[in-house]
Image (spheres, grey):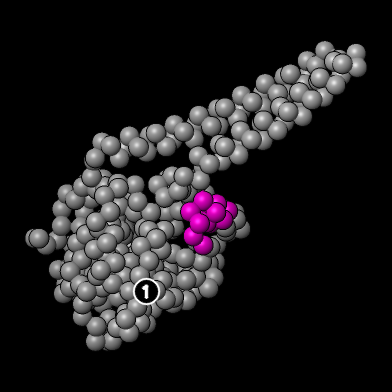
């Protein structure tokens, strides 16, 4: 059986369409399935639509968070609840084409354990959003060492991969990168991002920046290494200015140097504050992990487990 996990946040207009479309495609392909909608603390009628879909379509069920915990938490809640031999994750807005699930499933039947959805293009979006997305993927690819430029959360995973991910104890997780990190036999399926038919994207430039910071810090120590680089740069600048000052002193040409001193003080203070901020951010993440709070809280579900 194929378990399809669909995180949903304020997607009341898309729940019924997604449930009908995906169930129809999988039924026509003669693939046994279940569809798990995870309501990430939506403020609209998303949960009511999930309850309605589960009552009229066999194999559809839902989980409801007590509040908004984020997409990563929603995906892992679904992974922890699947009953199938393999599981796929795709977006509720159907920008991940659901017909590709059949192709992914056939590849899984051939023995592949991670089938990665790779974007051929990003579809229609504003220039500002495209620029922000490209910068985000460049930043996160460099920090994690994994090429994220065309990757997405659209994946199909074998049960052993799902179980491996579920055993990871950390609270702050990055599904897209972890699915690379665990390894296993993998292949790719290319797709074109589809246009939304209802609603609006929940991703803004600010949310992309927050998403990048959270996921980079949860998966990579690259920002901490950047502090060392900044320190080396500062040391090199100090050596150069120190050498110049000594030469001028010995030649009797020493100037007051007020401007130079101010520049060096401002530069070094900026480096120190940035470094302290990075360290503090990581300390905060460590604090979150030590508290041991759950990734999410399920307040309701459409079935009894």
User: Percent x, y for residue 295?
Assistant: 26, 47
Name the residue rendered at 35%, 62% in the picture.
Answer: 182
Element type at marker 1? loop
- Which region of the structure is painted magenta? 135-147
Q: Residues within 10 Å of mark 1 (few under 14, many from 20)?
A: few
User: Percent x, y for residue 219?
Assistant: 42, 50
- Compared across the picture, whether 238 is left or right of 162 comes to right
What is the quadrant of the C terminus in the image? bottom left
When asked about the image quadrant of residue 21, the answer is: bottom left
The residue closer to the viewer here, 280 or 15, is 280
Name the residue rendered at 35%, 37% in the picture.
Answer: 286
When asked about the image quadrant of residue 185, the answer is: bottom left
The answer to whether residue 122 of the structure is visible from this angle is yes
The residue closer to the viewer here, 123 or 52, is 123
When asked about the image quadrant of residue 273, the answer is: top right
- Compared across the picture, whether 155 is left or right of 158 comes to right
Q: Is residue 48 magenta?
A: no
Position of residue 207 relative to residue 49, above or below, is: above
Residue with the most extreme left position: 304
Name the residue rendered at 31%, 37% in the picture.
Answer: 288
User: Percent x, y for residue 144?
Assistant: 48, 54
The answer to whether residue 50 of the structure is visible from this angle is no
Q: Which residue is mark 1?
A: 185
Q: Is residue 138 magenta?
A: yes
The residue closer to the viewer here, 16 or 283, is 283
User: Percent x, y for residue 215?
Assistant: 42, 49
């Amino acid at each position: 059986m194929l378990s399809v996990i669909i995180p949903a946040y304020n997607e009341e207009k898309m729940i019924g369409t997604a449930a009908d479309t995906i169930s129809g495609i999988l039924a026509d392909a003669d693939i046994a399935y279940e569809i798990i909608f995870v309501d990430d603390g939506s403020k609209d009628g998303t949960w009511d639509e999930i309850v309605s879909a589960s009552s009229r379509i066999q194999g559809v069920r839902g989980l409801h968070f007590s509040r908004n915990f984020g997409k990563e938490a929603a995906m892992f809640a679904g992974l922890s609840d699947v009953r199938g031999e393999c599981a796929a994750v795709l977006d509720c807005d159907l920008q991940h084409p659901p017909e590709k699930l059949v192709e992914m499933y056939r590849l899984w039947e051939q023995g592949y354990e991670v089938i990665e959805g790779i974007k051929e293009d990003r579809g229609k979006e504003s220039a500002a959003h495209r620029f922000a997305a490209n910068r985000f993927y460049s930043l996160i690819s460099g920090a994690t060492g994994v090429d994220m430029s065309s990757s997405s959360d659209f994946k199909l995973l074998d049960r052993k991969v799902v179980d491996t991910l579920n055993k990871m104890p950390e609270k702050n997780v990055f599904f897209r990168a972890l699915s690379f990190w665990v390894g296993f036999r993998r292949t790719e399926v290319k797709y074109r991002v589809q246009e939304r038919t209802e609603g609006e994207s929940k991703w803004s430039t600010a949310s992309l920046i927050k998403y990048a910071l959270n996921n980079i810090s949860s998966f990579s120590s690259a920002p901490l290494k950047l502090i060392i680089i900044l320190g080396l740069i500062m040391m090199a600048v100090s050596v150069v200015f120190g050498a110049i000052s000594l030469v001028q002193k010995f030649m009797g040409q020493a100037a007051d140097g007020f401007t130079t001193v101010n520049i060096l003080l401002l530069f070094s203070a900026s480096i120190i504050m940035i470094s302290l901020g990075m360290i503090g951010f990581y300390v905060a993440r460590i604090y979150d992990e030590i508290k041991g709070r759950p990734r999410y809280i399920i307040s309701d579900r459409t079935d009894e487990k």
